[in-house]
Amino acid sequence: MARDYYEILGTSRDADQEEIKRAYRRLARKYHPDVNKEAGAEDTFKEINRANEVLSEPELRARYDRFGEAGVSSGGGGAPGYGDQGDMGGFADIFDAFFNGFGGAQGGQQQQARRRNGPARGEDLRLDLKLDFHEAIFGGEKEIRIPHLESCNPCKSTGAKPGSQPQTCGTCGGAGQVRRNTRTPFGNFTQVSVCPTCSGEGQVIEDKCEVCNGAGRRQETKKLKITIPKGVDNGTKLRIGKEGDAGLRSGPPGDLYVYLHVEEDAEFRREGINILSQVKISYLQAILGSHIQINTVDGPTELNIPAGIQPNTVLKLEHKGVPRLGNDISRGDHLLTLQIDIPGKVSSEERDLLEKLAKIRGDKVGKGGIGSIFGNVFK
C-alpha cells in the first residue's frame, strides 16, 4: 500500500502550498542522490518527488484528497467497473480529462518543462545564534560560520564536466514528463508522469563534474560578519538577504534567517525595554540615607538613597535601560528594588547603642528584639 503523501512530506492535510513547497525543498535537499549516499536514499527521494508532484498541483491534490492514490494514478482500483481495464488507464485518466481538459495537457507539460529547466531560487537557511545579555542590548558585529550550498565554479553550475554540457533527455525530449495515451469508454485520454530517466529535469548529464558530482552545487562552510542591531531580544529573527543556498541553473540564492537566543544574566533581568535588578543596603543606610555605587548595563554609577526608605521600594534610573529596537536613541529605564539587610547578630557595642536609642524612642524591647526600634524599616 502506498504511503500517505502528506506523511511523506511531514505536513498536515490542511497545509498551504508554501508549507508543501518548504517541506519538499528541505527533504529533497536531504535525500538527493548526489548528496545522500545512504542505502534507500534514492527510493526516498523518488517518494518525495511523487508526493510533491501531486500535492503541489491544486487539481491533483484535490483528486488525491477525495479519492486517494487511485485518483492520481493509472493503477486502477478507483472506480467500479473500470479498475481492471489494464492498459485503458482506469480511474485516473478519466479524471485527467475532466480536470485538465481534452487539449490542455500538452500546454501544461510544456509550461512545467520550462519551469523545471529554468533558473530556480536557492533554499532559505536558518541559523540559531546565542548572544550574551549585553550583546543583545548594545548590538555589534558577530562572525558566524554557515554550511551552505555554493555554485560549483568549475562546471559553472551545470553539473557537467568542464568542456561538456548536459544533454536533452532522450526519453522525454526535455519536457521532464512522459505522456501515455490510454483508451476508456469515454474516449482517448493522456496520463502525464515524471520522466523516470531524468527525474523531471529534462536533461541528463553523461559526464559529471568531478567537483560537485553533477549536482551543480557543492557544500561549503563560509565565514560571514553580520550586524546585530541594538535592543534585540530572545526570539528576534534577522533576515540576511542572498546568504542562503545558491540557486540552481544560475538562479538567485536564498536568504539566511538568523534566530537569536539571549542568555540570562546573573545580576540583571529584562522586561521589555526596561532593566530590573535588586540592591541590598544596610538598615542604617535605609534609616539615615546614603549615596552608594551600583552596577548598570552601562557600568558603575552612583545612586542616592533617601533617608527613611522602606523595603521593596523601587527606584528608577531613567534612560539606563535597553535601546528601543529600530530607534536606539530611545531607551528604557533601570528599575532597582531595594532590599534592606538586617543583621542576624550585632556586637555588644552595637547592641548598647541600639538599646540606648530604644530608650530615647520609648520602645519596649526584649532580649533579641531590637527590630521595633525601626518601625516599618524591617517590615
Image (cartoon, rainbow, N blue to C red):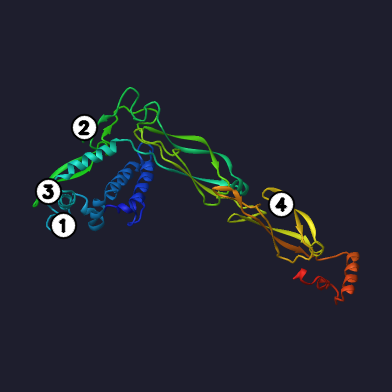
Q: Which mark is residue 295?
A: 4
Residue 336 position, x and y percent, is 69, 58
Of pointers 4 and 2, the one earlier in the residue sequence: 2
In this picture, is 282 found above or below 220?
below
Of pointers 1 and 3, the one earlier in the residue sequence: 1
Of pointers 3 and 4, the one earlier in the residue sequence: 3
Of pointers 2 and 1, the one earlier in the residue sequence: 1
Q: What residue would you read off at disc 1?
A: 79
Real-space Cα separation, disc 1 to disc 4, in angstroms: 77 Å
Real-space Cα separation, disc 3 to disc 4, in angstroms: 82 Å
- Where is the C terminus found, in terms of image quarters? bottom right
Real-space Cα separation, disc 3 to disc 2, in angstroms: 25 Å
Q: What residue would you read off at disc 3?
A: 88
Amino acid on which the number 4 mark rests in the picture: Asn
Q: Residue at x 49, y 34 (%)?
A: 222
How packed is label 1: few (under 14 Cα within 10 Å), some, or many (20 or more)?
some
Residue 282 position, x and y percent, is 79, 61
Q: Which mark is residue 170?
A: 2
Q: Quadrant of residue 366?
A: bottom right
| Residue closest to the eye, 74 or 346 | 346
Foreground mark, 1 or 4, reads 4
Amino acid on which the number 3 mark rests in the picture: Met
Of pointers 1 and 4, the one earlier in the residue sequence: 1
Amino acid on which the number 1 mark rests in the picture: Ala
Real-space Cα separation, disc 1 to disc 3, in angstroms: 13 Å
| Secondary element at image label 2 | loop
| Residue closest to the eye, 16 or 318 | 318
How packed is label 3: few (under 14 Cα within 10 Å), some, or many (20 or more)?
many
How packed is label 2: few (under 14 Cα within 10 Å), some, or many (20 or more)?
few
| Secondary element at image label 3 | helix
